[in-house]
Image (cartoon, rainbow, N blue to C red):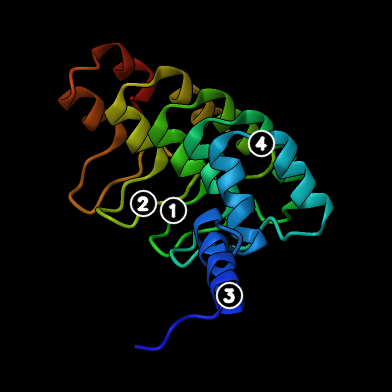
Amino acid sequence: MKSVTPNCKTALCAFTLLLISGCVTTPEEKLRQAVVDGNLLRVRTFLEQGVNAQTADARGITPLHLAAKHGHRNMVEVLLERVSAVNLKSQDGITPLSIAVQEGRRELVALLLEKGAQVQEQVQIGGATLLHVAAYRGNQEIISLLLQHGADKQARMTSGERPVDLAQQQGHTTLIPLLEP
């Protein structure tokens, strides 16, 4: 067996350290991780260095999607200063707004709608709209926001249910007057 020279050992150690420390990741991956971690200073630094805030991962998830998922309003605001498209879709057709609705993040729903997010978006599975999702979850504040921005009470899923039907099925009886056509 061949012995490893000191220079090779040093290079091997340096490479191993590089892999372990995560230095091999791209700036875009580091930006996404900073968003997940809620590290606003790092996010701003990456953006000031020119890292593209709209770059998606292999599944189409952008930093804006991640900020919505983790409820980082300040991150959403900073990213929206750099992102021209608020309705970016992942490979599964998920937008930052649909994530915010699903997660029940009222403040982010309001902010994204204010910035032009599309309220009539349909989820790929079953033809549900964001209003269907909010009705199913029983979130009156988000339902009110969606309705204020033109959500369609009459929208039907592929199985025929309207948002009011889902609210009723889930026992959210206080929402029925709000959702009735």
Q: Is residue 28 above or below residue 78?
A: below
Read off the residue under disc 4: 75
Quarter of the image where one finds residue 170: top left
Read off the residue under disc 2: 123
| CA–CA distance in space, label 4 to label 3 | 46 Å
Q: Amino acid at mark 4?
A: Met
Q: Please tell me whether mark 2 sits on a helix, a strand or a loop.
A: loop
Label 4 crowd bin: few (<14), some (14–19), many (20+), radius 10 Å: many
| CA–CA distance in space, label 4 to label 2 | 24 Å
Looking at the image, residue 1 sits to the left or right of residue 110; the answer is left
Of circles 4 and 3, which is in front?
3
Please indicate, yes or no, whether residue 44 appears anywhere in the rendered image. yes
Label 1 crowd bin: few (<14), some (14–19), many (20+), radius 10 Å: some
Read off the residue under disc 3: 6
Q: Amino acid at mark 2?
A: Val
Looking at the image, residue 49 sits to the left or right of residue 24; the answer is right
Of circles 1 and 3, which is in front?
3
Callout 1 touching callout 2 (CB < 8 Å)? yes
Label 3 crowd bin: few (<14), some (14–19), many (20+), radius 10 Å: few
Of circles 1 and 4, which is in front?
4
Q: In terms of sequence position, does the residue under pointer 1 or pointer 3 come before the other?
A: 3
Q: Which residue appears farthest toward the bottom when viewing the image? A: 2
The residue drawn where x is 20% and y is 23% is 168
Q: Nearer the viewer, residue 46 or 142?
A: 46
| CA–CA distance in space, label 1 to label 3 | 52 Å
Q: Amino acid at mark 3?
A: Pro
Quarter of the image where one finds residue 136: top left
Read off the residue under disc 1: 94
Q: Nearer the viewer, residue 140 or 36?
A: 36
The C terminus: image quadrant: top left
Of circles 1 and 2, which is in front?
1
